[in-house]
Image: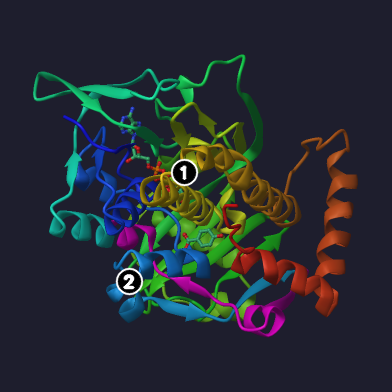
Amino acid sequence: MKTQVAIIGAGPSGLLLGQLLAKQGIDNVIVERVSGEYVLGRIRAGVLEQGMVDLLREAGVSERMDREGEVHTGVELAFNDKRVRIALDELTGGDTVMVYGQTEVTRDLMDARKEAGLTTVYEASNVQLHDVKTDAPYVTFEKDGEQVRLECDYIAGCDGFHGVSRQTIPDEVKTEHERVYPFGWLGLLSDTKPCHEELIYCKTDRGFALASMRSPTRSRYYIQVPLTDKVEDWSDDAFWTELKRRLPADVAATMETGPSIEKSIAPLRSFVCEPMQYGNMFLVGDAAHIVPPTGAKGLNLAASDVATLYKIMTRVYKDGDKDCVMQYSEICLRRVWHGERFSWWMTNMMHDFGEVEVNGTDSQTFSRFMESELNFYTDNEQGRRVIAMQYVGLPYEDIK
Ligand code: APR
Ligand code: PHB
């Protein structure tokens, strides 16, 4: 097999990149480890920055999002028995976010790729990257018992945190930055009416909670839990009872509950691999970086990586400018670190660290610092603007 860009992974990063490259006539093949159904079964985030919305429109896969997605002009932070609304549009000169599930984004991208007749190899095993430092890299994998060799010009490692692409960068070349948080998020999806028309991020002495949604009839909720908890420890009733204790009382009093469609615990981690490229291999999205979901940045940072690589590949194949590929990692990392810091900051401010020492500070003192931070930034318009600018997403950087 031969293509121009080999894409490892059919998650949002790989599918969005593949769709955009195809729009420019750049041939690409996606090699995915699991089935398409398995990819669609993953329940992930649901808040899209304007940059990602624009990319999906440019890729020609925004029709259902524009029909079914909800434009949100604000989010709420609830703490110390008060609720502060961050008026995103007023504070940023009109920017908003789109609430539309990542599963739906992935489904739309899969459907568009199939309709365009583009090649996606699902259930490929033993995927390996070769000769990435040469002008003739290639990928090998096994499919239906056959060993396949995919020759290409470039490889996009869109294979997530547990993928194979990042391992291609030698240890002596890469630096991995990591912060693992001492708690996780127990998430529940239910076909119930959302408890509020906007998202509510709640900080309580029982721990963090988030009320989100997927549609007017489907809700997504999270509560902070200890890392020692297992999802089987939590019945639906136990979840609803605890969630109601962490949401604002008036919201909890009227919220609709129901059976869980999905329930799972996710660990929280900040992670960045530097650099994000090695030879003609480029790390994209979760393959290069992970954020705690408190800032709704995971999918959106993947989108800005895709935008940068898409611009670079277009410059290479349309203008014959191969040197521009060297800009990729530096441009991506500038925006990635802003997203990492915002997500780390929001996680520190909104969660209960219990008795855990943080950055050499005892938990009680750290908690006082964070309480002051949250009050300071929400008590005045400039502070709320700092939160709003980052929540809607900082601008994408152009290639030189
Ligand atoms: N070979 C081929 N495919 C692989 C391999 C491999 N060795 N390892 C992993 N994959 C596939 C996974 O099965 C998955 O479908 O790569 C894909 C990576 O997708 P994601 O993990 O979703 O990462 P990404 O596409 O960058 O999307 C980032 O998705 O998971 C969320 O929180 C994340 O919101 C963020 C967004
Ligand atoms: C979600 O709806 O799943 C969601 C929304 C906002 C976040 C995290 C998750 O910050």
- Residues under numbered marks 2 and 1 in contact, where contact means CB atoms less than 8 Å apart: no
Task: Give the class, few, some or many, for how many residues have Cα within 10 Å of label 2's Cα (few <14, many ≥20).
Answer: some
Q: Position of residue 85 (x, y in %)?
A: 68, 79
Q: Which residue was labeled with disc 2?
A: 62
Residue 273 appears left or right of 24: right
Q: Nearer the viewer, residue 229 or 303?
A: 303
Q: Which residue was labeled with disc 1?
A: 321
| Amino acid type, label 1 | Asp
Residue 280 in which image quadrant: top left
Q: Position of residue 91 (x, y in %)?
A: 71, 80
Residue for point 47% across, 73% down: 98
Which numbered disc, 2 or 1, marks the residue closer to the eye? 1
Indicate whether residue 92 is drawn in magenta: yes
Residue 131 in which image quadrant: top left
Residue 197 appears left or right of 34: right
Looking at the image, residue 255 lies above or below residue 129: below
* Span of residues in magenta: 80-106
Q: Secondary structure at mark 2?
A: loop
Q: Secondary structure at mark 1?
A: loop
Residue for point 28% across, 74% down: 64
Q: Is residue 214 visible?
A: yes
| Amino acid type, label 2 | Ser
Q: Nearer the viewer, residue 113 or 44?
A: 113
Looking at the image, residue 200 lies above or below residue 316: below
Residue for point 20% across, 47% down: 37
Q: Position of residue 74 (x, y in %)?
A: 60, 79
